[in-house]
C-alpha cells in the first residue's frame, strides 16, 4: 500500500512538472463541476411584507452543485494585440456557457403572537433542475495559466415540484399553545414536503433571473490538448418571481391573520428573491481548434 501511495505522489509531481504550455489561441471547450454555497438575499417593501404576515424577512445559507459546458475563443496577445511576448498578458477570451444543476432559496420570516411571543419560521426550498447560461469576457495572464473572468447571464428554475424543509424556533409546548389558540389554523411544527406549482402559476411566475459573476481560474496543462481547471467564483443573482409559492402551513397562517390573502392571484410586485453565490470550480479544458 505504501509503495502505491509513493508511486501516485511521484506520478502527480511528474505530471505537474511537465513543460507544457497553456492554450494561447483558438477555441476551447470546458466541462466544469461547481460546488457552491448560496445565501438568499430577500427584498420586499413594508406593504407586501405585511400582506404576507411577516414582521421581517432574512436569508439563509444552502449548498448545491451545478455543471457547465463552456465554449471559449481566445484572441491571443501576439496576433490580435501586437505584443511580442505573452508572459504577463496572454490575450482576451469570449466565452459562452450553458449549465444545469440544483438551486436553493431559504428565508427566515418573523412575526409576533400574543400567546407565544416572537416567532421565527425557517423555510428552505431546493430545486432541480435549474438551467443557467451566460456570456463571459476573460483576461489571460501569466502565459495563459491564470484567467480572470466576468460573466453576465441568467438562471432559470424549471422544477415544478421543488422540495422544502420548514421549522420554527418554538418549543413543542409553544407549538401546541399556538395551534390551540388559533383553532388549529396556525401550525408551525416541523415539516418536509413538495411544493406543487400548478400550471396556471407556472405561467405567471417570472422564469428567468439575471446574474453577474466574477471568477478566477488556474489552468494546469496535462497533455497538448487537455488541461485541468481549478477556480473560484462569486456571483449575485437577481430574481423577481412576481408570484410566491409557499408551504401550505405558511399560507394558512397568513390567511388566518388576513383572510383576503391569495398568493395565486395576487402578485407580490416588490418581492426579490436574490442570492449571493460563491464556490469552487473543478473541470477539464479541451483544445478544439487553433494553434
Image (cartoon, rainbow, N blue to C red):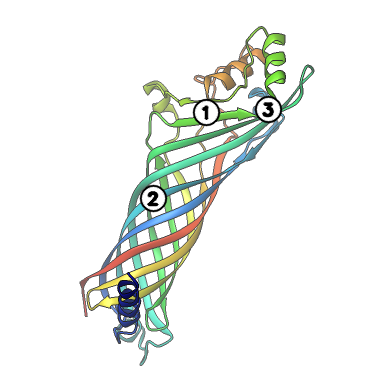
Tell me the crowding category of disc 1: few under 14, some 14 to 19, or many 20 or more residues within 10 angstroms, Cα based.
Answer: many
Tell me the crowding category of disc 2: few under 14, some 14 to 19, or many 20 or more residues within 10 angstroms, Cα based.
Answer: many
Residue at numbered disc 1:
244
Query: Vertically, is 81 above or below 114?
Result: below
Q: Tell me the residue at 47%/63% (across/down).
A: 232
Tell me the crowding category of disc 3: few under 14, some 14 to 19, or many 20 or more residues within 10 angstroms, Cα based.
Answer: some
Q: Position of residue 229 (x, y in %)?
A: 36, 68
Q: Farthest left residue?
A: 289
Question: Is 38 on the left-hand or right-hand side of 25?
Answer: right
Instruction: Kindly check if marks 2 and 1 are in contact, taking CB atoms under 8 A apart as contact.
Output: no
Nearer-N-terminus badge (1/3): 3
Residue at numbered disc 3:
54
Nearest to the observer: residue 18 or residue 129: 18
What label sits on residue 73 in the rendered view?
A: none
Q: Position of residue 22 (x, y in %)?
A: 32, 79
> Of discs 2 and 1, which sits in the foreground?
2
Residue at numbered disc 2:
66
Query: Vertically, is 60 above or below 143?
Result: above
Q: Position of residue 122 (x, y in %)?
A: 61, 32
Nearest to the observer: residue 125 or residue 147: 125
**Secondary structure state at the residue bearing disc 2:** strand
Quadrant containing the C terminus is bottom left
Q: Position of residue 125 (x, y in %)?
A: 50, 34
Q: Tell me the residue at 52%/28% (across/down).
A: 244
Nearer-N-terminus badge (2/3): 3
Nearer-N-terminus badge (2/1): 2
Amino acid at each position: 500500500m505504501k509503495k502505491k501511495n509513493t508511486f501516485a505522489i511521484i506520478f502527480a509531481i511528474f505530471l505537474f512538472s511537465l513543460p507544457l504550455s497553456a492554450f494561447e489561441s483558438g477555441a476551447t471547450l470546458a466541462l466544469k463541476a461547481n460546488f457552491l454555497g448560496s445565501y438568499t438575499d430577500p427584498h420586499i417593501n413594508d406593504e407586501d411584507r405585511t400582506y404576507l404576515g411577516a414582521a421581517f424577512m432574512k436569508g439563509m445559507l444552502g449548498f448545491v452543485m451545478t455543471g457547465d459546458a463552456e465554449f471559449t475563443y481566445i484572441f491571443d496577445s501576439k496576433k490580435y494585440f501586437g505584443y511580442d511576448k505573452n508572459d504577463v498578458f496572454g490575450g482576451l477570451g469570449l466565452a459562452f456557457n450553458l449549465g444545469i444543476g440544483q438551486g436553493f432559496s431559504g428565508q427566515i420570516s418573523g412575526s409576533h403572537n400574543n400567546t407565544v411571543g416572537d416567532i421565527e419560521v425557517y423555510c428552505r426550498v431546493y430545486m432541480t433542475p435549474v438551467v443557467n447560461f451566460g456570456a463571459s469576457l476573460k483576461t489571460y495572464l501569466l502565459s495563459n495559466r491564470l484567467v480572470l473572468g466576468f460573466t453576465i447571464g441568467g438562471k432559470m428554475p424549471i422544477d415544478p415540484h421543488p422540495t422544502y424543509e420548514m421549522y420554527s424556533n418554538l418549543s413543542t409546548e409553544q407549538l401546541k399553545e399556538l395551534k390551540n389558540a388559533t383553532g388549529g389554523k396556525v401550525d408551525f411544527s416541523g415539516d418536509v414536503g413538495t411544493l406543487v406549482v400548478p400550471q396556471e402559476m407556472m405561467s405567471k411566475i417570472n422564469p428567468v433571473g439575471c446574474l453577474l459573476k466574477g471568477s478566477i481560474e488556474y489552468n494546469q496543462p496535462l497533455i497538448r490538448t487537455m488541461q485541468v481547471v481549478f477556480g473560484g467564483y462569486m456571483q449575485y443573482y437577481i430574481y423577481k418571481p412576481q408570484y410566491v409559492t409557499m408551504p401550505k402551513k405558511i399560507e394558512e397562517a397568513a390567511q388566518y391573520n388576513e383572510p383576503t390573502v391569495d398568493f395565486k392571484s395576487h402578485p407580490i410586485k416588490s418581492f426579490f428573491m436574490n442570492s449571493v453565490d460563491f464556490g469552487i470550480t473543478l473541470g477539464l479544458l479541451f483544445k478544439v481548434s487553433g494553434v
